[in-house]
Amino acid sequence: MHKICWVGMILLLSLTGLPHLDLLPERPSTALASDEGENPSLTDQSEPELSSPPEASTENCEPSFAPLATEEPAMKTDLTAGDELNGDFKLEKLPVDPRKQAQEFDIPIVINARVEHFIQYFQTTARKIFVNWLARSERYIPFMRNLLRESGLPEDLVYMALIESGFNPYAYSRMKASGPWQFIYFTGKKYGLNVSWWVDERRDPEKSTIAAAKYLKDLYDLFECWYLAAAGYNAGEGKIINAMKRYRTEDFWELTKYRYLKRETKDYVPQMIAAALIAKNMKSGFLSERRTCS
């Protein structure tokens, strides 16, 4: 009798448990993929930086400009949210031979394949951002030119601020450089800018321009060449001094043929020249092309 009871209980438990085997849903294969997928990068910026354009083969430049994995993009500025301007602008292709404009500058203008490459780049791939920068420049270029001239420096150095920040006082880079002239903390303090919890004079267009003029004057006194001074502003004077010693040359273009300088520094001078050529060429007719959006 006991055996019959035990057999009956076992059969009853088996019958009640079997249906549950079919009620367990299978986990979709896509769920595993989504759970294990990569999260979006936490370093993504709200607005893309200007990176270097595709390579251009030229005899005057290093054969390969592909950066190492640790190098930063050529244009390091991080534009803040709301940087877009209202309005539509026409930025036509440079209609004149830039070589004919070289005499209009008070900084040396060299036209080589790399400079022409960036002229093309600013007017095509990077057109949208560059147009905004040119539109904003009207507010800052006049008084910045005056400050540079009062410091005894070439006025056309103002176009360094164009490629540094697009004349955005609130530009802030991943290297923690701030303001229209992109000073890092220690260099800003060295040249008289108050940087504290309450105030950041690196963002003051006038005070930062005065500080940039002092720094550029020191760099020129050191290198006696505006291309090397500009490269030193970007990479630090120590980096340029070491490059000159290593390769035994004081020619900026010769230094760009070697790996020692970062791609950003190699592209800094040709970007400055290209930006200056476009900005001066568009000065007379650019702002007149502005149209208000409906």
Image (cartoon, rainbow, N blue to C red):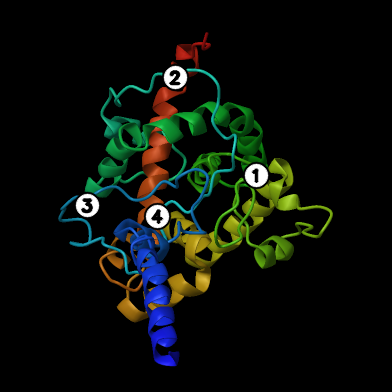
Q: Is residue 45 left or right of residue 104?
A: right
Residue drawn where x is 26% and y is 43% of the image: 117
User: In what element is the residue under mark 3?
Assistant: loop
Sequence-first tag of 3 and 2? 3
Q: Is residue 244 left or right of residue 172?
A: left
User: In what element is the residue under mark 2?
Assistant: loop
**Position of the N terminus by quadrant:** bottom left
| Marks 2/4: CA–CA distance | 25 Å
- Amino acid type for the residue under numbered disc 3: Glu
Q: Is residue 125 left or right of residue 132?
A: left
Sequence-first tag of 1 and 4? 4
| Marks 1/2: CA–CA distance | 23 Å
Residue corresponding to mark 3: 55
Residue corresponding to mark 1: 170
Residue corresponding to mark 2: 89
Residue corresponding to mark 4: 74
- Amino acid type for the residue under numbered disc 2: Phe
- Amino acid type for the residue under numbered disc 4: Ala
Farthest residue in the front direction? 1
Q: Position of residue 215 (x, y in %)?
A: 62, 59
